[in-house]
Amino acid sequence: MTTTEFQRAMASAKDYDNPDDRIAIIKRAVTSEVRAADPTVQPRFTEYFNHSIAPDIVLQWPNEHRERLLFVRPTAHADWLLNDMRFLSRHRPLVFALEDLAMSQATGRTEDGVQSLGRAATDAGTWITDSTGTEAIASVRQQSPTLALLSQALVRGGRGISDSEEIQSLTDATEAGFAGASRLSSDDTASAVRAIERHLEPDQSGRLTRLLRAVWEAHGGDQAHFPPTATVGNLTADDLSFLLKTATEGSPDFWRRIGRAVSTEMLGQTQVDDPSPGLQVLMSTNLEVLQAKGVRLLYEPLRLAESEQVPRWLVSKGCLALRGRNWTAYVAARRTEEFPPADPPQPLDLVTLRRRAQEGPTRITQVRIGRGEREFKEGGNVLGHPGLAKAALDLGVSDIQGVVAAIPGGGNVNVDFSTDTAAGPTSATFLLGALMRFALPLLSDLPPDEREAVAQWLRGYGYQDTLFPAAHDSGDEHPATR
Protein backbone atom coordinates (compact mmCIF):
# COMPACT_ATOMS: atom_id res chain seq x y z
CA MET A 1 0.00 0.00 0.00
CA THR A 2 1.04 3.63 -0.47
CA THR A 3 1.88 5.92 2.42
CA THR A 4 -1.51 7.60 2.00
CA GLU A 5 -3.27 4.22 2.17
CA PHE A 6 -1.23 3.33 5.23
CA GLN A 7 -2.25 6.57 6.92
CA ARG A 8 -5.88 5.85 6.09
CA ALA A 9 -5.55 2.42 7.68
CA MET A 10 -4.13 4.06 10.80
CA ALA A 11 -7.02 6.52 10.86
CA SER A 12 -9.59 3.74 10.42
CA ALA A 13 -8.12 1.87 13.38
CA LYS A 14 -9.28 4.69 15.64
CA ASP A 15 -12.89 4.02 14.70
CA TYR A 16 -12.86 0.74 16.63
CA ASP A 17 -13.68 0.78 20.32
CA ASN A 18 -12.24 -2.67 20.91
CA PRO A 19 -8.43 -2.39 21.40
CA ASP A 20 -7.90 -5.84 19.89
CA ASP A 21 -9.60 -4.75 16.68
CA ARG A 22 -7.46 -1.61 16.46
CA ILE A 23 -4.28 -3.59 17.04
CA ALA A 24 -5.25 -6.16 14.39
CA ILE A 25 -5.75 -3.42 11.77
CA ILE A 26 -2.41 -1.84 12.63
CA LYS A 27 -0.55 -5.16 12.46
CA ARG A 28 -2.15 -6.05 9.12
CA ALA A 29 -1.17 -2.66 7.70
CA VAL A 30 2.44 -3.00 8.91
CA THR A 31 2.58 -6.55 7.55
CA SER A 32 1.41 -5.33 4.13
CA GLU A 33 4.21 -2.75 4.12
CA VAL A 34 6.87 -5.32 4.96
CA ARG A 35 5.59 -7.90 2.48
CA ALA A 36 5.58 -5.28 -0.28
CA ALA A 37 9.33 -4.94 0.32
CA ASP A 38 9.95 -8.70 0.64
CA PRO A 39 7.11 -10.89 -0.73
CA THR A 40 8.85 -14.06 0.52
CA VAL A 41 8.48 -13.15 4.19
CA GLN A 42 5.99 -15.05 6.34
CA PRO A 43 4.81 -12.86 9.23
CA ARG A 44 3.32 -14.26 12.42
CA PHE A 45 1.43 -12.05 14.86
CA THR A 46 2.11 -12.31 18.58
CA GLU A 47 -0.30 -11.50 21.41
CA TYR A 48 1.63 -8.34 22.27
CA PHE A 49 1.52 -4.74 21.08
CA ASN A 50 4.00 -1.95 21.79
CA HIS A 51 5.65 -4.11 24.46
CA SER A 52 9.08 -3.20 25.79
CA ILE A 53 10.74 -6.53 25.00
CA ALA A 54 8.10 -8.76 23.32
CA PRO A 55 7.79 -8.37 19.54
CA ASP A 56 4.54 -7.50 17.79
CA ILE A 57 5.30 -9.62 14.73
CA VAL A 58 7.81 -12.41 14.02
CA LEU A 59 9.19 -12.47 10.46
CA GLN A 60 10.16 -15.85 9.03
CA TRP A 61 11.33 -17.11 5.63
CA PRO A 62 10.73 -20.46 3.90
CA ASN A 63 13.82 -22.66 3.57
CA GLU A 64 15.71 -20.52 6.09
CA HIS A 65 16.25 -21.46 9.72
CA ARG A 66 16.11 -17.89 10.93
CA GLU A 67 13.67 -15.20 11.94
CA ARG A 68 13.61 -11.47 12.63
CA LEU A 69 11.56 -9.79 15.30
CA LEU A 70 9.49 -6.74 14.38
CA PHE A 71 8.54 -4.12 16.95
CA VAL A 72 5.85 -1.56 16.16
CA ARG A 73 6.37 1.84 17.75
CA PRO A 74 3.73 4.61 17.68
CA THR A 75 6.31 7.39 17.71
CA ALA A 76 9.31 8.24 15.56
CA HIS A 77 10.80 10.56 18.19
CA ALA A 78 14.54 9.94 18.27
CA ASP A 79 14.93 10.19 22.04
CA TRP A 80 12.15 7.70 22.72
CA LEU A 81 13.44 5.24 20.13
CA LEU A 82 16.96 5.61 21.48
CA ASN A 83 15.65 4.72 24.92
CA ASP A 84 13.99 1.59 23.42
CA MET A 85 17.31 0.51 21.95
CA ARG A 86 18.46 -0.53 25.42
CA PHE A 87 15.86 -3.31 25.40
CA LEU A 88 15.67 -4.19 21.69
CA SER A 89 19.24 -4.12 20.37
CA ARG A 90 20.13 -7.68 21.40
CA HIS A 91 17.39 -8.96 19.04
CA ARG A 92 18.77 -7.09 15.99
CA PRO A 93 15.14 -6.35 15.06
CA LEU A 94 13.15 -4.32 12.58
CA VAL A 95 11.50 -1.34 14.30
CA PHE A 96 8.55 0.07 12.37
CA ALA A 97 7.45 3.58 13.36
CA LEU A 98 3.80 4.39 12.74
CA GLU A 99 4.73 8.05 12.71
CA ASP A 100 6.52 9.51 9.67
CA LEU A 101 10.25 9.72 10.42
CA ALA A 102 10.83 12.85 8.32
CA MET A 103 7.85 14.67 9.78
CA SER A 104 8.95 13.83 13.29
CA GLN A 105 12.35 15.33 12.55
CA ALA A 106 10.74 18.50 11.18
CA THR A 107 8.69 18.97 14.34
CA GLY A 108 11.38 18.83 16.92
CA ARG A 109 13.90 16.02 16.62
CA THR A 110 17.39 17.30 17.39
CA GLU A 111 20.16 16.51 14.93
CA ASP A 112 22.29 15.10 17.75
CA GLY A 113 19.46 12.77 18.77
CA VAL A 114 18.96 11.54 15.22
CA GLN A 115 22.68 10.92 14.75
CA SER A 116 22.93 9.11 18.08
CA LEU A 117 19.95 6.92 17.18
CA GLY A 118 21.41 6.19 13.74
CA ARG A 119 24.76 5.14 15.21
CA ALA A 120 23.10 3.00 17.87
CA ALA A 121 20.83 1.27 15.34
CA THR A 122 23.70 0.61 12.95
CA ASP A 123 25.95 -0.79 15.67
CA ALA A 124 23.14 -2.99 17.00
CA GLY A 125 22.03 -4.31 13.60
CA THR A 126 18.60 -2.75 14.08
CA TRP A 127 16.64 -1.33 11.16
CA ILE A 128 14.33 1.60 11.93
CA THR A 129 11.95 2.59 9.16
CA ASP A 130 8.40 3.80 8.46
CA SER A 131 5.78 3.48 5.73
CA THR A 132 7.64 5.97 3.50
CA GLY A 133 10.77 3.83 3.69
CA THR A 134 9.04 0.55 2.87
CA GLU A 135 7.03 2.20 0.11
CA ALA A 136 10.20 3.66 -1.42
CA ILE A 137 11.96 0.31 -1.62
CA ALA A 138 8.80 -1.61 -2.66
CA SER A 139 8.15 0.82 -5.51
CA VAL A 140 11.54 0.18 -7.13
CA ARG A 141 12.03 -3.55 -6.47
CA GLN A 142 10.37 -4.42 -9.80
CA GLN A 143 12.79 -2.23 -11.77
CA SER A 144 15.71 -4.66 -11.60
CA PRO A 145 16.85 -7.91 -9.95
CA THR A 146 19.47 -5.83 -8.10
CA LEU A 147 16.88 -3.71 -6.33
CA ALA A 148 14.70 -6.76 -5.65
CA LEU A 149 17.61 -8.34 -3.79
CA LEU A 150 18.35 -5.08 -1.99
CA SER A 151 14.71 -4.84 -0.90
CA GLN A 152 14.78 -8.37 0.52
CA ALA A 153 18.12 -7.73 2.20
CA LEU A 154 16.80 -4.67 4.03
CA VAL A 155 13.89 -6.60 5.52
CA ARG A 156 16.13 -9.50 6.49
CA GLY A 157 19.14 -7.55 7.70
CA GLY A 158 18.78 -3.80 7.30
CA ARG A 159 20.30 -1.53 9.92
CA GLY A 160 20.32 2.17 10.76
CA ILE A 161 17.49 4.62 10.03
CA SER A 162 15.79 4.55 6.62
CA ASP A 163 13.11 7.01 5.58
CA SER A 164 12.19 7.50 1.93
CA GLU A 165 15.06 9.92 1.27
CA GLU A 166 17.62 7.52 2.71
CA ILE A 167 16.18 4.62 0.70
CA GLN A 168 16.36 6.68 -2.50
CA SER A 169 20.01 7.47 -1.85
CA LEU A 170 20.79 3.79 -1.20
CA THR A 171 19.00 2.51 -4.31
CA ASP A 172 20.67 5.13 -6.50
CA ALA A 173 24.12 4.16 -5.17
CA THR A 174 23.41 0.45 -5.61
CA GLU A 175 22.18 0.77 -9.20
CA ALA A 176 25.11 3.03 -10.09
CA GLY A 177 27.49 0.54 -8.49
CA PHE A 178 26.28 -2.42 -10.52
CA ALA A 179 26.38 -0.35 -13.70
CA GLY A 180 29.85 0.84 -12.70
CA ALA A 181 31.04 -2.73 -12.06
CA SER A 182 30.07 -3.65 -15.63
CA ARG A 183 32.19 -0.68 -16.84
CA LEU A 184 34.98 -1.48 -14.35
CA SER A 185 34.48 1.91 -12.67
CA SER A 186 36.23 1.69 -9.31
CA ASP A 187 34.65 4.88 -7.96
CA ASP A 188 31.01 3.91 -8.58
CA THR A 189 31.62 0.36 -7.39
CA ALA A 190 33.36 1.52 -4.22
CA SER A 191 30.53 3.97 -3.46
CA ALA A 192 28.01 1.15 -3.78
CA VAL A 193 30.04 -1.08 -1.45
CA ARG A 194 30.14 1.66 1.20
CA ALA A 195 26.40 2.36 0.94
CA ILE A 196 25.45 -1.32 1.03
CA GLU A 197 27.67 -2.13 3.98
CA ARG A 198 26.46 0.92 5.90
CA HIS A 199 22.79 -0.08 5.56
CA LEU A 200 23.01 -3.89 5.84
CA GLU A 201 24.45 -6.28 8.39
CA PRO A 202 27.33 -8.46 7.11
CA ASP A 203 25.29 -11.51 6.08
CA GLN A 204 23.06 -9.44 3.80
CA SER A 205 25.65 -6.94 2.60
CA GLY A 206 27.91 -9.85 1.69
CA ARG A 207 25.29 -11.17 -0.76
CA LEU A 208 25.24 -7.91 -2.70
CA THR A 209 28.97 -7.25 -2.61
CA ARG A 210 29.61 -10.83 -3.80
CA LEU A 211 27.35 -10.12 -6.74
CA LEU A 212 29.12 -6.84 -7.43
CA ARG A 213 32.41 -8.72 -7.47
CA ALA A 214 30.96 -11.35 -9.81
CA VAL A 215 29.71 -8.68 -12.25
CA TRP A 216 33.12 -7.00 -12.06
CA GLU A 217 34.92 -10.23 -12.93
CA ALA A 218 32.34 -11.15 -15.59
CA HIS A 219 33.36 -8.03 -17.50
CA GLY A 220 37.06 -8.77 -17.28
CA GLY A 221 37.89 -6.95 -14.05
CA ASP A 222 40.85 -8.11 -11.99
CA GLN A 223 39.72 -9.46 -8.63
CA ALA A 224 42.68 -7.74 -6.96
CA HIS A 225 41.42 -4.34 -8.12
CA PHE A 226 37.90 -4.78 -6.77
CA PRO A 227 37.17 -2.41 -3.85
CA PRO A 228 37.76 -4.01 -0.42
CA THR A 229 34.69 -5.45 1.31
CA ALA A 230 33.96 -6.29 4.93
CA THR A 231 32.93 -9.87 4.15
CA VAL A 232 33.20 -12.40 1.36
CA GLY A 233 30.90 -15.27 2.39
CA ASN A 234 29.44 -18.09 0.31
CA LEU A 235 27.38 -17.77 -2.84
CA THR A 236 23.64 -18.46 -2.32
CA ALA A 237 20.84 -19.67 -4.59
CA ASP A 238 19.49 -16.10 -4.70
CA ASP A 239 22.93 -14.84 -5.73
CA LEU A 240 23.14 -17.42 -8.49
CA SER A 241 19.61 -16.62 -9.71
CA PHE A 242 20.61 -12.99 -10.02
CA LEU A 243 23.78 -13.82 -11.94
CA LEU A 244 21.96 -16.09 -14.37
CA LYS A 245 19.52 -13.26 -15.15
CA THR A 246 22.04 -10.45 -15.46
CA ALA A 247 25.54 -11.71 -16.31
CA THR A 248 24.64 -12.42 -19.94
CA GLU A 249 28.11 -11.40 -21.13
CA GLY A 250 29.97 -13.70 -18.76
CA SER A 251 32.76 -15.66 -20.40
CA PRO A 252 33.24 -19.44 -20.01
CA ASP A 253 36.12 -18.68 -17.63
CA PHE A 254 33.80 -16.56 -15.50
CA TRP A 255 31.16 -19.31 -15.29
CA ARG A 256 33.85 -21.89 -14.57
CA ARG A 257 34.98 -19.83 -11.55
CA ILE A 258 31.38 -19.34 -10.41
CA GLY A 259 30.77 -23.07 -10.72
CA ARG A 260 33.43 -23.86 -8.15
CA ALA A 261 31.19 -22.16 -5.56
CA VAL A 262 27.97 -23.83 -6.80
CA SER A 263 26.41 -27.18 -5.90
CA THR A 264 23.82 -29.23 -7.77
CA GLU A 265 21.50 -28.76 -4.80
CA MET A 266 21.86 -24.97 -5.09
CA LEU A 267 21.07 -25.12 -8.80
CA GLY A 268 17.77 -26.84 -8.04
CA GLN A 269 16.83 -23.93 -5.74
CA THR A 270 17.48 -21.16 -8.24
CA GLN A 271 14.87 -19.11 -10.07
CA VAL A 272 15.99 -19.36 -13.70
CA ASP A 273 14.37 -18.17 -16.90
CA ASP A 274 13.94 -20.83 -19.55
CA PRO A 275 15.83 -20.89 -21.79
CA SER A 276 18.81 -19.48 -19.90
CA PRO A 277 22.02 -18.94 -21.91
CA GLY A 278 23.99 -18.44 -18.72
CA LEU A 279 22.85 -21.78 -17.31
CA GLN A 280 23.99 -23.59 -20.46
CA VAL A 281 27.52 -22.20 -20.16
CA LEU A 282 27.61 -22.73 -16.40
CA MET A 283 26.75 -26.39 -16.87
CA SER A 284 29.09 -27.02 -19.79
CA THR A 285 32.03 -25.60 -17.82
CA ASN A 286 31.23 -27.55 -14.63
CA LEU A 287 29.85 -30.94 -15.71
CA GLU A 288 33.03 -32.61 -14.56
CA VAL A 289 32.95 -30.86 -11.15
CA LEU A 290 29.32 -30.90 -9.98
CA GLN A 291 28.18 -33.94 -8.01
CA ALA A 292 24.79 -35.70 -8.15
CA LYS A 293 22.99 -38.59 -6.51
CA GLY A 294 20.99 -39.78 -9.48
CA VAL A 295 18.87 -39.15 -12.59
CA ARG A 296 15.17 -39.84 -13.28
CA LEU A 297 13.74 -39.77 -16.81
CA LEU A 298 10.18 -38.57 -17.39
CA TYR A 299 8.47 -38.56 -20.79
CA GLU A 300 7.12 -35.03 -21.18
CA PRO A 301 6.11 -33.67 -24.61
CA LEU A 302 7.16 -30.11 -25.41
CA ARG A 303 4.52 -27.67 -24.20
CA LEU A 304 2.86 -25.05 -26.35
CA ALA A 305 5.13 -21.98 -26.63
CA GLU A 306 7.99 -23.81 -24.90
CA SER A 307 11.45 -23.28 -26.36
CA GLU A 308 12.35 -25.87 -28.98
CA GLN A 309 16.03 -25.55 -28.14
CA VAL A 310 16.94 -29.10 -27.15
CA PRO A 311 18.87 -30.43 -25.46
CA ARG A 312 19.12 -27.66 -22.88
CA TRP A 313 19.55 -27.33 -19.14
CA LEU A 314 16.75 -25.86 -17.03
CA VAL A 315 15.47 -25.86 -13.46
CA SER A 316 12.07 -27.49 -12.98
CA LYS A 317 10.13 -29.08 -10.09
CA GLY A 318 12.89 -28.18 -7.66
CA CYS A 319 15.57 -30.00 -9.67
CA LEU A 320 18.27 -29.26 -12.17
CA ALA A 321 17.15 -31.00 -15.37
CA LEU A 322 18.19 -31.75 -18.95
CA ARG A 323 15.37 -31.19 -21.45
CA GLY A 324 15.03 -33.32 -24.57
CA ARG A 325 12.47 -33.40 -27.37
CA ASN A 326 9.84 -35.31 -25.44
CA TRP A 327 11.57 -36.12 -22.19
CA THR A 328 13.21 -34.49 -19.18
CA ALA A 329 16.05 -35.99 -17.15
CA TYR A 330 15.72 -34.71 -13.56
CA VAL A 331 18.79 -34.65 -11.34
CA ALA A 332 18.73 -35.42 -7.61
CA ALA A 333 21.56 -33.67 -5.80
CA ARG A 334 21.81 -35.76 -2.61
CA ARG A 335 18.60 -37.77 -2.02
CA THR A 336 16.27 -39.72 -4.27
CA GLU A 337 13.35 -38.02 -2.47
CA GLU A 338 14.20 -34.91 -4.47
CA PHE A 339 12.89 -36.52 -7.68
CA PRO A 340 9.43 -35.68 -9.01
CA PRO A 341 7.00 -38.66 -9.15
CA ALA A 342 7.91 -41.31 -11.71
CA ASP A 343 5.96 -42.14 -14.86
CA PRO A 344 3.84 -45.34 -14.89
CA PRO A 345 6.20 -48.32 -15.32
CA GLN A 346 6.91 -49.59 -18.83
CA PRO A 347 8.31 -53.15 -19.14
CA LEU A 348 11.87 -53.55 -20.41
CA ASP A 349 12.85 -56.87 -21.96
CA LEU A 350 16.23 -58.55 -21.99
CA VAL A 351 16.79 -57.90 -25.70
CA THR A 352 16.33 -54.13 -25.23
CA LEU A 353 18.57 -54.09 -22.18
CA ARG A 354 21.35 -55.86 -24.07
CA ARG A 355 21.07 -53.45 -26.99
CA ARG A 356 21.14 -50.35 -24.78
CA ALA A 357 24.08 -51.65 -22.75
CA GLN A 358 26.00 -52.50 -25.92
CA GLU A 359 25.43 -49.05 -27.39
CA GLY A 360 26.87 -47.51 -24.22
CA PRO A 361 28.88 -49.61 -23.81
CA THR A 362 27.95 -50.35 -20.19
CA ARG A 363 29.09 -53.18 -17.92
CA ILE A 364 26.11 -54.73 -16.09
CA THR A 365 27.07 -56.64 -12.94
CA GLN A 366 23.64 -57.65 -11.66
CA VAL A 367 20.14 -58.08 -13.13
CA ARG A 368 16.78 -58.19 -11.35
CA ILE A 369 14.24 -60.16 -13.38
CA GLY A 370 10.64 -59.58 -12.37
CA ARG A 371 10.46 -60.09 -8.62
CA GLY A 372 13.39 -62.47 -8.61
CA GLU A 373 17.03 -61.50 -8.53
CA ARG A 374 20.05 -63.20 -10.11
CA GLU A 375 23.63 -62.08 -9.86
CA PHE A 376 26.40 -63.30 -12.16
CA LYS A 377 30.00 -62.18 -11.71
CA GLU A 378 31.89 -64.36 -14.12
CA GLY A 379 33.57 -62.26 -16.78
CA GLY A 380 32.50 -59.06 -15.07
CA ASN A 381 29.44 -58.53 -17.30
CA VAL A 382 26.28 -60.44 -16.46
CA LEU A 383 24.67 -59.80 -19.87
CA GLY A 384 27.21 -62.16 -21.47
CA HIS A 385 26.55 -64.96 -19.00
CA PRO A 386 24.81 -67.96 -20.65
CA GLY A 387 22.66 -68.58 -17.58
CA LEU A 388 20.85 -65.23 -17.72
CA ALA A 389 18.36 -66.14 -20.44
CA LYS A 390 17.75 -69.53 -18.76
CA ALA A 391 17.05 -67.77 -15.43
CA ALA A 392 14.44 -65.59 -17.10
CA LEU A 393 12.90 -68.65 -18.75
CA ASP A 394 12.82 -70.62 -15.49
CA LEU A 395 11.05 -67.73 -13.72
CA GLY A 396 8.56 -67.45 -16.55
CA VAL A 397 9.03 -63.67 -16.90
CA SER A 398 10.67 -61.41 -19.46
CA ASP A 399 10.53 -58.02 -17.74
CA ILE A 400 13.74 -56.54 -16.40
CA GLN A 401 13.05 -54.78 -13.10
CA GLY A 402 16.48 -53.23 -12.71
CA VAL A 403 20.23 -53.67 -12.91
CA VAL A 404 23.39 -52.70 -11.13
CA ALA A 405 25.95 -51.23 -13.51
CA ALA A 406 29.52 -50.01 -13.21
CA ILE A 407 29.87 -46.30 -13.94
CA PRO A 408 33.05 -45.22 -15.75
CA GLY A 409 35.47 -43.71 -13.28
CA GLY A 410 34.49 -46.08 -10.46
CA GLY A 411 31.44 -47.07 -8.46
CA ASN A 412 28.17 -48.86 -9.07
CA VAL A 413 24.78 -47.37 -9.89
CA ASN A 414 21.38 -48.94 -9.22
CA VAL A 415 19.16 -48.60 -12.28
CA ASP A 416 15.43 -49.12 -11.66
CA PHE A 417 13.53 -49.49 -14.94
CA SER A 418 10.15 -49.42 -13.16
CA THR A 419 10.81 -45.74 -12.35
CA ASP A 420 13.40 -44.96 -15.05
CA THR A 421 15.83 -43.95 -12.32
CA ALA A 422 19.58 -44.36 -11.97
CA ALA A 423 20.98 -43.55 -8.52
CA GLY A 424 23.95 -44.34 -6.35
CA PRO A 425 23.52 -46.72 -3.39
CA THR A 426 23.48 -45.41 0.21
CA SER A 427 25.25 -42.01 0.26
CA ALA A 428 27.15 -42.42 -3.01
CA THR A 429 27.29 -39.48 -5.45
CA PHE A 430 28.97 -39.13 -8.82
CA LEU A 431 30.32 -36.48 -11.14
CA LEU A 432 27.27 -35.15 -12.94
CA GLY A 433 28.71 -35.41 -16.46
CA ALA A 434 29.74 -39.04 -16.00
CA LEU A 435 26.38 -39.91 -14.44
CA MET A 436 24.37 -38.35 -17.27
CA ARG A 437 26.48 -39.94 -19.99
CA PHE A 438 26.07 -43.30 -18.26
CA ALA A 439 22.36 -43.10 -17.40
CA LEU A 440 20.66 -41.72 -20.51
CA PRO A 441 21.64 -44.57 -22.89
CA LEU A 442 20.36 -47.13 -20.36
CA LEU A 443 17.10 -45.35 -19.56
CA SER A 444 16.01 -44.39 -23.06
CA ASP A 445 15.98 -45.26 -26.76
CA LEU A 446 16.86 -41.91 -28.32
CA PRO A 447 16.71 -41.48 -32.11
CA PRO A 448 20.22 -41.41 -33.61
CA ASP A 449 20.22 -37.66 -34.32
CA GLU A 450 19.05 -36.77 -30.81
CA ARG A 451 21.46 -39.25 -29.27
CA GLU A 452 24.30 -37.50 -31.13
CA ALA A 453 23.07 -34.06 -30.02
CA VAL A 454 22.88 -35.18 -26.38
CA ALA A 455 26.32 -36.76 -26.68
CA GLN A 456 27.79 -33.44 -27.80
CA TRP A 457 25.91 -31.50 -25.15
CA LEU A 458 27.27 -33.70 -22.36
CA ARG A 459 30.88 -33.24 -23.43
CA GLY A 460 31.68 -30.57 -20.88
CA TYR A 461 35.04 -28.93 -20.29
CA GLY A 462 37.42 -31.53 -18.88
CA TYR A 463 35.47 -34.35 -20.55
CA GLN A 464 37.25 -37.66 -21.05
CA ASP A 465 35.75 -39.87 -23.77
CA THR A 466 34.02 -42.89 -22.18
CA LEU A 467 30.47 -43.85 -23.15
CA PHE A 468 29.84 -41.51 -26.06
CA PRO A 469 32.22 -41.33 -29.02
CA ALA A 470 33.75 -37.87 -29.34
CA ALA A 471 31.85 -35.84 -31.91
CA HIS A 472 34.50 -33.17 -32.31
CA ASP A 473 38.21 -32.73 -31.97
CA SER A 474 39.32 -31.90 -28.43
CA GLY A 475 39.98 -28.30 -29.41
CA ASP A 476 36.43 -27.63 -30.60
CA GLU A 477 34.30 -25.08 -28.84
CA HIS A 478 31.48 -26.49 -26.72
CA PRO A 479 28.02 -25.90 -28.29
CA ALA A 480 26.79 -24.02 -25.21
CA THR A 481 29.39 -21.28 -25.66
CA ARG A 482 28.85 -20.63 -29.35
Image (cartoon, rainbow, N blue to C red):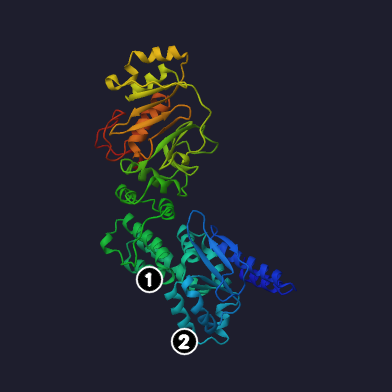
Q: For mark 1, does the 10 Å Cα neighbourhood hold few (<14), some (14 to 19), or many (20 or more) residues?
A: some
445, 279: nearer the viewer: 445
Q: Is residue 123 left or right of residue 379?
A: right
Q: Is residue 317 left or right of residue 482?
A: right
389, 63: nearer the viewer: 389
Residue 63 seen in render: yes
Q: Which residue is mark 1?
A: 194
Residue 482 seen in render: no
Quadrant of res 36: bottom right
- Seen in the picture, residue 464 relative to 147 is either above or below; the reply is above
**Can you give x and y, in whole percent of width and height, for residue 106 in the image?**
56, 84
Image quarter hosting the C terminus: top left
Query: In the rendered structure, which disc, 2 or 1, sits on the residue that comes first in sequence?
Result: 2
Q: Residue at horizontal 24%, vertical 37%?
A: 475
Q: Residue at horizontal 67%, vertical 68%?
A: 25
The answer for how far apart the CA atoms under marks 2 and 1 are is 23 Å
Q: For mark 2, does the 10 Å Cα neighbourhood hold few (<14), some (14 to 19), or many (20 or more) residues?
A: few
**Can you give x and y, in whole percent of width and height, for residue 200 in the image?**
43, 68
Quadrant of res 329: top left
Callout 1, which amino acid? Arg
- Seen in the picture, residue 238 relative to 116 is either above or below; the reply is above
For residue 473, the mark is: none
Q: Which residue is mark 2?
A: 112
Callout 2, which amino acid? Asp
Secondary element at image label 1:
helix
Image quarter hosting the N terminus: bottom right
